[in-house]
Amino acid sequence: MKKYIRYIILFISFLLGIYFLNKWSNKEYEIEQNMLHNNFVLKGKVDSFKISNNHCFAILYISKFKSNSKEFNPKKEKKYFPYAIENNRAEVYDRICESQISIGDSIFINSNNKTVYYKTKKDGNFEGDLEMAGGDISFIKEHSKLFKENFK
């Protein structure tokens, strides 16, 4: 009988752990979504890109663009926005595969809608969700050309 009580307590502890982890991650997601609602807009053409081996994550390098920001540092409060602007150059950090993007493709970001729109030669028009750059920070550190001080 004691053996079953131990398993029941272990199972209840496991369920409580999952509950609190889920609650914490939902709160963290909500904070990030609120941070992304910052009126940032960017429209431009992809000059080049670097694709990681991590689930089709890429850095898109853009030099010909229009934006409502002259400079945007992607690092804020130990989090990284999915875009950066410095010295008339921009970078976008997004989940996109090499087969989906080409040099010269158009990109449009509207942070308030939390979307990134692509007009591509290969796949036509499609949109993706705008998310904070999370698990790919080491790839950004290695290949970013902007705000090097953020990634030391």
Image (cartoon, rainbow, N blue to C red):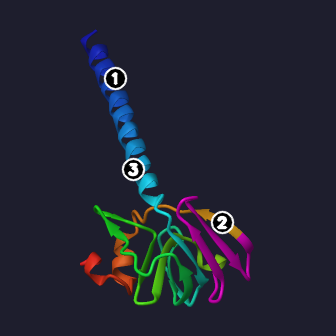
Question: Compared to 16, does 94 lie above or below?
Answer: below
Q: Amino acid at mark 2?
A: Glu
* Mark 3 → mark 1, Cα distance in angstroms: 29 Å
Look at 50% across and 68% down and name the residue there: 40
Residue 12 got which mark?
Answer: 1
Look at 74% across and 75% down and name the residue there: 123
Look at 60% across and 83% down and name the residue there: 44
Over which residues does the magenta segment extend? 101-125
Give percent across and percent down for residue 139. 39, 76
Question: Compared to 6, does 117 lie above or below?
Answer: below
Residue 20, picture quadrant? top left
Using the image as rendered, state which of residue 97 and residue 147 is in the foreground.
Answer: 147
State left or right for residue 70 relative to residue 13. Answer: right
* Mark 2 → mark 3, Cα distance in angstroms: 23 Å
Q: Which residue is mark 3?
A: 31
Q: Which residue is mark 2?
A: 127
Whichever of callouts 3 and 1 sits on the residue coming sooner in the sequence is 1
